[in-house]
Image (cartoon, helix red, strand yellow):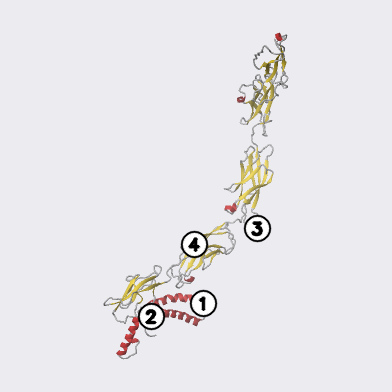
Amino acid sequence: MTGKLNGSCFYNLSYFYIDCAVNTWRSSCGTMPERLTEMLMDTWTPLIILWITVLPSIFMAPMNQSQVLPSGSSTGLKRLTEEQRVLNRSKRGWVWNQMFVLEEFSGPEPILVGRLHTDLDPGSSKIKYILSGDGAGTIFVINDKTGDIHAMKRLDREEKAEYTLTAQAVDRDTNKPLEPPSEFIIKVQDINDNAPEFVDGPYHATVPEMSVVGTFVTKVTATDADDPVYGNSAKLVYSILEGQPYFSIEPHTAIIKTALPNMDREAKEEYFVVIQAKDMGGHMGGLSGTTTVTITLTDVNDNPPKFAQSMYHFSVMEDVALGEPIGRVKANDLDIGENAKSSYDIIEGDGMDIFEITTDAQTQDGIIRVRKPLDFETKKSYTLKVEAANIHIDPRFISGGPFKDTATVKIVVEDADEPPVFSSPTYLLEVHENAAINSVIGQVTAHDPDVSSSPIRFSIDRHTDLERQFNINAEDGKITLATPLDRETNMWHNITIVATETRNHSQVSRVPVAIKVLDVNDNAPEFASEHEAFLCENGKPGQVIQIVSAVDKDDPKNGHYFLYSLLPEMVNNPNFTIKKNEGCRAPDRQIPSLLRPKPEVIHQVFIRLDRPT
C-alpha cells in the first residue's frame, strides 16, 4: 500500500484486524462457545481501542514524497510534484476520519487523540493548523505545525460523550485561510466504569397468598450510565441474592414471579427479596448494583370462622329491657378484612322467638339481645344453637369448606324483684248517689309475681281524690265511700290505686279506677222558664195560647213522664184547659262520658183556650 493512508482506511483496517483475530481463534479452536467469545471481546476491546487512538498519528503523518518516487532526475521529481499539487488542489479536502479517545484514560503525558492533515500540506512548515470549538485550548490542544491533537484532561463519556470542533489551515506568514473551516467530532470511547443502579428502589409489591407458581409479582428496572451501544458495559442480567426459593426473577426482563405454590399469609406475610443487576452480560468482572423488594402476601378467604369455645353460658335478669344485649360470642377467622367478616344466626333452640343475634361491625362479635319479655316464674333457662358463616366466599377454596361454624348458648333467667301485678289493668265501679257513708263500692286485687311473694298494701293516690270522697282498706283493697255523692253534681270519679310490697317499698304498681255514680229520683221537676201568656179579646175556642215545659235533673232509665194540671183554684175555671203535647217526647236516653254533663229532659204541654172569655 503506497501513498497516503487516510483515516477511514485506517479504521476500517483496524476493525479488520479485530475480526481477523477473533476468526483466527475460532478457526484454530473450532466452534467457540458464546461465553468464551464474549470474554475475548471484553478483554481485547479496550486494548484495540487504545491502539486505535494512538496508531492514527503514525499513519496520518505526512508521507515523504521520496518514499513513493523512484530514483531519477530532479526534472521528473518537479513534474510529479506539480501534478500532485494540481491534483490535491482539485480535491480541496481534509484527510482524517472521526476521532476517538478512551474515557478515564490518563498518563504522565497528554493523550494523542489524532492528527489533522490537509492535502495542501506538502510537508513544509508554511501551513498553520488552528483548532476551535468544544474544549479547544483547554481539553484539546493542537500542534499548529503537525496537526497533532492531544487530550489534556481525563474525560468522562457519561459527562459528555462527544465534542464538536472546527479545524482550519492558514498560511503561517499571512494568516490567510488555505481551506474553508471544517467540523469534525471527537467521540469519547466508553469503558465499563459505571455500576447498574436501581433509581426507583427500594420496591414494594403484593401478591395474593396461595398463588400458583409463576404468578407475576412485579418488575424492577436498573439503569447503567455506560454506552448501551458499545460492548457489553450496559448489558444487564438480573438475579436474586435473597428470597429463594419463594420467588424467581427472569434474567433479562427483571420480572419477579412466585416460585413456590400455596404460600400462606397466615404462616408468613412478608418477604424481603434482594435483587442484583450485573453488567457485562453478567460475566466475571462486571459491575453490579442491588435493590430490595418487600413482597407482602395479600389475604384470600381460605380460612373458615371458628368459635373460640363450643359452649357459652349467660345469665340475665327477667326484667331486662327489650333490645338490651345479654352476651357476646366470637368466631375467630385467621383471614383479615372482608374475608374475615361473618354473619351470625340462631338456627335451633327453644328461644328462637325470644332472642336474636346481630353482628358487631367493628369487632365481628355476635351480640345476643332480648326480643320478648322474660319471666322467671314461667321459664328459667333457654338453649340456643348459633351459627357463624363467612359473608364473602372465594370459589377457588370452596372445597376446603364449609366456611361456617356452630356453638351452643345456654341462657339462665334470674329472678328479679318485680312490682305487684293487679288482677286487671283498669277497674270500673258503680255506686248509687244515695249510698251510705262507709259502704263498700268495690275492690281491687294484686299479687307479688316473685317466688318469694311479699304481702301487698293498697292506698289511694290523693292527687286523684283531692276531696277525699273514697277510702281503701290497705289489706284487702276494698274501696268505701267517705262522703255523700251527688250524681247531678259529678257523675264520674277517676282515682288511682297504689299497690306496694311491704318488704320492698320501691316495688310499686298503680291502676286506674273509674267510679260511676248511678241516679236515684231525688229531684222534683222544674219549669224550664217563667211563662207569661197574652190573649186577644177575640180569641177562639180551642186556640193554643201558651206552651209550657218542665225539666228534671234526674235521669231514670225509662225516661220522664210528667203530669201537668192547673192549680187547684183554677181547676173549675171554665175558660182554660191544659193538655199534654203528644207529639213532643223526651230525647233518647244517653250514657254520658265520664266528664260530659247530663242533658236535661224536657217535656212540653199546651195551654188551650176552651171558650172565649
Neighbor class of circle 2 (other Cα within 10 Å; few <14, some 14-19, many 20+) is some
Specify the amino acid type for callout 2. Asn
Q: Amino acid at mark 3?
A: Ser
The answer to whether 535 appears left or right of 263 in the picture is right
Say if 52 sits above or below 553 in the image.
Answer: below
Instruction: Kindly identify which numbered label has been placed on residue 6.
Output: 2
| In the foreground, 224 or 7 | 7
Q: Position of residue 497 (x, y in %)?
A: 64, 27
- The reply to whether residue 563 is visible in this rendering is no
Q: Nearer the viewer, mark 2 or mark 4?
A: 2
Give above or below for 421 relative to 77.
Answer: above
Q: Earlier in the sequence, mark 4 or mark 3?
A: 4
What number is the disc on residue 399?
Answer: 3
Sequence-wise first label, 2 or 3: 2
Badge 1: few (under 14), some or many (20 or more) residues near its Cα, within 10 Å? few
What is the number of the mark on residue 33? 1
Q: Residues within 10 Å of mark 3 (few under 14, many from 20)?
A: few
